[in-house]
Amino acid sequence: MPSPDGSSPAAAPTPPLPPVTSAPPGRNRRPRLSDVAARAGVSAGLVSLVLRHQPGPSEQTRARVLEAARELGYRADRTASLLARRRSQHLGVVMDVRNTFHAELVAEMDAAATRRGYDLVLSTLTPTRDERTATENLLDFRCEGLILIGPEDRAGWLTSLGQELPVVAVGRRLKSDSLDVVRAADDLGVAQAVAHLAGLGHRDIAFVDGGRGTIASDRRRGYRQAMRGHGLAEQTRIIPGDHTEEAGIRAAPELLNRHATAVVASNDRCAVGLLDRLARLGTEVPASMSVVGYDDSMLARLGHVDLTTVSQDAPGQAEEAITLLAERLDDGRAEPREIVLPPRLVLRSTTAPPAP
Amino acid sequence: MPSPDGSSPAAAPTPPLPPVTSAPPGRNRRPRLSDVAARAGVSAGLVSLVLRHQPGPSEQTRARVLEAARELGYRADRTASLLARRRSQHLGVVMDVRNTFHAELVAEMDAAATRRGYDLVLSTLTPTRDERTATENLLDFRCEGLILIGPEDRAGWLTSLGQELPVVAVGRRLKSDSLDVVRAADDLGVAQAVAHLAGLGHRDIAFVDGGRGTIASDRRRGYRQAMRGHGLAEQTRIIPGDHTEEAGIRAAPELLNRHATAVVASNDRCAVGLLDRLARLGTEVPASMSVVGYDDSMLARLGHVDLTTVSQDAPGQAEEAITLLAERLDDGRAEPREIVLPPRLVLRSTTAPPAP
DNA sequence: AGGTCCGTTTAAAGCGCTTTAATAGGTCGT
DNA sequence: ACGACCTATTAAAGCGCTTTAAACGGACCT
């Protein structure tokens, strides 16, 4: 670790420098509150009140202070405010910056947080930065609450984190008595997809699985139940897979073997893989095969792909997550809540009635 | 604006509470440096030294302090450190969280920054948060230097920002005597694409333009020069467009009208639009038309798309950006630098020799 | 003994802001 | 004229940490 500054504490006998405060204002010293105060001829406390639009100061001083601040180009040092204020008004978000769904959520959360007077601090996962590291980083920043997008760490750890400060887990089903959860009803989403296909007249509706994991199993369960609900239990076909394009590519021939006329993929990436392989195998979509994805990712929206899929309602999830934190922080709620949002089927061009 | 805490400054005559410091440690009060010090039976200053691995403390106290810190679950308050330290070791990054290329850059920057002992603070653009707002947010956090990814604000503003603190603009050509620039040689990248196609035997190589903007004009210039260089000045065909899929979709028929056998698109999104429309028009890629994109985005890498494209070397740009800041901050460099990285052609499956 | 020097340790002064109790000046009633 | 009671303002005490000068206690010389 490189030493933060050049001077080793106990080495060179440094000449006695004058204390920083009485030093001549360096060319580039950032103006401080006291500078504004001096210029306006009032006390620092008053300046603080004025700049934060607090009641108290008279109109006249208010104007003088604002003028002085403007002239000096004053900009409050947030670090110092944070320290002095009891509250930081910061919410931390742990996300994977390369995940487009996360990105979408964050953008919406930022808007929602701003509306409530909070600021977001982002901490991203990278190959060299795991969930805990990212989280601790946020704690160091004095975040008052945390939002973890699609957390994968042990439930135990999450729970103990939730005992320290308000924490919202987004997108992962999780039973814990210390933290809040926002997620979409994945089983319901798949059910909607199946209902849509069944409504079009399909009976041989297959499902490409998403592998292990809470999300995948919810979707699988949704598929099973929906098929049963439509009297298609016999036609249930679960093709092993995961959440990558690769899985879709592998699943495509299997689909044809099994004479499926429609398929629900565990997510959009997988569906895109399916579309690709099907095209190469000469199977027309949607004429000979209907395909439904899951996530309504940017991928699905490409004119090029135009995939019928299930939307997870990112704006809704974002809004709810922020609301949950605000409830804990501002209204003193203590008991955990779980918000389950209904997904929404987005009809595009990859589904149609089966060939006669 | 909701008042941050419940007590209005001049209202109810609050009973004289004891000062916070002497209050009984609340159940959930986060342990402070002084708590650790008390527990270890030493002074706060010493604890500070130990926890930051500074020379001075004896082995024995070092052990005692670490033990005490561990027992209390002590975690330094970064806000307070920042305030007390002269340097924050923070670098701010302004990015658009929904842009995958930005995301990739950020991930790489984070690694590079960590290696040099800096921490990244992210500030994202949203529809309700423009470049200046995002930037000012970072300044409030006491960032020592700033990285602006693909900044679009006026050069004048950027320049004056650069006079306040070290600033690196990434991905935008920009002449300014106050800030550093990292970018890829876009003209060279397009030239490589043209050379590749010419090498395969193509002569009618068209270009779908990216519209106005520095980046687009660099690429256009690269195309023109390269065509001339290959003795194909006569075959130069610039089809108007922009950086969206839509542009590619519109350009495709035009391409066929003009009897092009190959095309370089101004970016990947545009290329994907092209691929889509070409497929619907019954033109096989690469058999009847070769297509090259630009950016090597995730889009291009999808098995499904598998687009030959030009990579902008995100890791390289990220590394250079961090290095530039480190040079300014740690080595005291003052004169501006511009780093231009060579792009790299990535061969995939959308290019082939022309049909005989 | 007395002094010097060393490695350790501590007390105290900040960092730049917020907050609160106290103060200063009015106005008003009697 | 006096106290009561406003409102506008200030001084000062923190927030939790870092940093510096000064203090301490040996060990080691003369």
Image: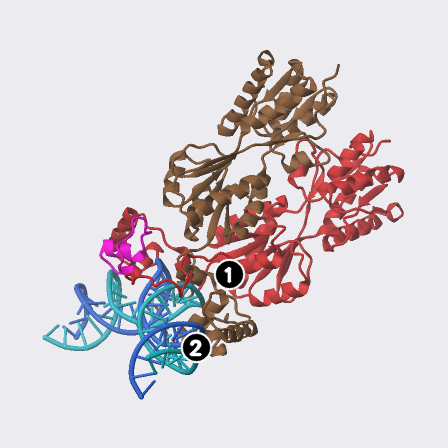
Chain colours: A red, B brown, C blue, D cyan
Q: In the displayed structure, would residue B4 be above or below residue A299?
A: below
Quadrant containing the N terminus of chain B in the rendered view: bottom left
Asked whether A155 or A326 is in front, the reply is A155
Q: Is residue A210 left or right of residue D8?
A: right
Q: Hey, what amino acid is under mark 1?
A: Asp
Query: What kind of element bears circle 2?
Result: loop
- The subunit letter for the residue under badge 2 reads B
Q: Quadrant of residue B79?
A: bottom left
Pointer 1 residue: A140
Judged from this view, the residue extending furthest toward the top is: B234
Q: Is residue A284 visible?
A: no
Asked whether B94 or A101 is in front, the reply is B94
Does the segment drawn in magenta span residue B348? no
Q: Is residue A309 left or right of residue A31?
A: right
Q: Is residue B135 visible?
A: yes
Q: Hey, what amino acid is under mark 2?
A: Ala
Query: What kind of element bears circle 1?
Result: helix
Name the spot of residue B19 as percent of width and height, x first: 38, 75
Pointer 2 residue: B23
Please give the label number shown on residue A28: none
Residue appearing at x 50%, y 65% in the figure? B53
Residue appearing at x 61%, y 25% in the figure? B192
Q: In the displayed structure, would residue A336 be above or below residue B112?
A: below
Name the spot of residue A190 as percent of width and height, x first: 75, 47
Q: Which residues are magenta?
A: A21-44
Asked whether A195 or C12 is in front, the reply is C12
Name the spot of residue B125 as percent of width and height, x first: 50, 43
